[in-house]
Every structure is written in C-alpha cells, then in structure tokens.
Amino acid sequence: AQRVTQPEKLLSVFKGAPVELKCNYSYSGSPELFWYVQYSRQRLQLLLRHISRESIKGFTADLNKGETSFHLKKPFAQEEDSAMYYCALIQGAQKLVFGQGTRLTINP
Amino acid sequence: NAGVTQTPKFQVLKTGQSMTLQCAQDMNHNSMYWYRQDPGMGLRLIYYSASEGTTDKGEVPNGYNVSRLNKREFSLRLESAAPSQTSVYFCAIRVGGMETQYFGPGTRLLVL
C-alpha cells in the first residue's frame, strides 16, 4: 500500500539557517508527490509539486527514487516559514495520501 | 476568495447527537473530498465524490455518511457523534488535470 512518512513531528531552526523537512514514501509505480503547507489560521494550500520542478517561496524538493524520498529544503529560513507542512502522494487517479505532518518553527 | 466554503466553522456536540457539515464550491469541479485532520495523523480521507451523484469510501469512513446531490455541494453527516470524531474537517476539490487539491477553511468539531 502507498504510504507517506514524515519522521519529524516538530522541527525548530533559527532564522537564516537551512531547513530540511523529510518525506519518505512507498509506492510501486512512478510517484507524483506534493508538499502542502498550512500557515496559522489559514487553509491548507499547495506549496509545490515534484513534477513542476519549481521553487516556491525559496523552497525546493527533489524526488529521489533510489531513496524513495522527497525532502523539502530551503537554504535560509525566514520567520514566515513557520507552519505545518504535509507531504502527499497521489493514489490512483483521484486520491491524495498525506504524511503525518511536520510543524516547522523558525526562531528569531 | 470563496472557492470552497465550509459551514459551520466550529461546532460542539454531545455524544450521540447528529449533525451535517456542509461544503460548497463555486469552481465547477467534479471531484470533491472530505478529510479529517488529527495531530500526529496528518489528513485522512473520509469520503470522496468523483462526480455528482457518486461517492466512495476513503481511509476512515466509519461513522460518517456523505451526500453529493449536485455538482456544487458535498455534505458530511455524523449520525451519532462520538468523542473519537473530535477533529478538524476539511473539504477539498480536485483542480484541473494536475491532481492538486484546493481546500476549504475547515470545520472544528468537538464531541463531548
């Protein structure tokens, strides 16, 4: 069965430090992966998709099929990056499978 | 932006009471979803609807029913609420052909 694992429930870093949120997945085919973010008192929203190979708000994520990982990275954290982050995987044609989430706190 | 709206925003129920969570979209998309969000569990799919008049179970459907009577609305019903259903409930729609989902603001439900 497809699974998404985010091993860190909480992650705290200082402003200006690099950030890496880990995501590992299990999937038998070619995965389509996403990162979603939920800022305080806001709705969950898409941050980036692996298929687009884009950088959003300074974040990037590279799909590593050998390690079955899709870690989210940012070289210099900002206070406004504090949020809940979810990694997600497409299951079939309709459904997303989410990881447990990582709460990122950026300390001033 | 409206997009996906949910009502109510917050609700307190007693064990055994029933209620319906409403979700409406103005984006004319076929697929709609209901998730629950619990600490340490992420988001788990309760039910989804690929189109008007069709619904399918997700990962955690027990204790819930859904209704998709038209393209715009997708409701989630708790017939007999239990404390284990205390959660934040999110409705979402599938956007275009990119497999991304757009979420509503959520409904916080507390069952005592």
Image (tube, coloured by chain):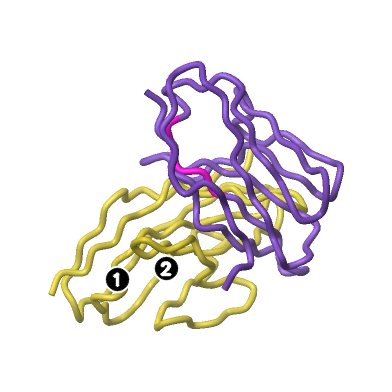
Chain colours: A yellow, B purple
* Residue that badge 1 annotates: A19
Label 2, on which residue? A72
Q: Nearer the viewer, residue A37 or A89?
A: A37
Residue B105: x and y in percent read: 50, 57
Residue type, mark 2 in image: Leu
**Magenta-span inclusion, residue B89:** yes
Q: Which residues are magenta?
A: B86-90
**Left or right position of B101 against B36:** right
Element type where label 2 sits in the image: strand
Disc 1 marks a residue whose amino acid type is Val
Name the residue: 73% across, 68% down.
Answer: B27
Q: Is residue B96 left or right of residue B75?
A: right
Query: In which image quadrant can residue B40 be found?
Result: top left
Q: Quadrant of the N terminus of chain A?
A: top right
Among numbered discs 2 and 1, the one appearing first in the sequence: 1
Disc 1 is attached to a residue of which chain?
A
| Residue appearing at x 37%, y 58% in the figure | A84
| Marks 2 and 1 close (CB-CB < 8 Å) | yes
Secondary structure state at the residue bearing disc 1: strand
Task: Give the alpha-carbon distance from disc 2 to disc 1, as whole Å.
Answer: 8 Å
Can you give x and y, in whole percent of width and height, for residue A95 in the image? 69, 49
Q: Position of residue A64 (x, y in %)?
A: 53, 65
Question: Which residue is at the front of the view, A6 or A81?
Answer: A81
Residue A17, above or below B72 = below
**Residue B75 quadrant:** top right
Quarter residue B25 falls in: bottom right
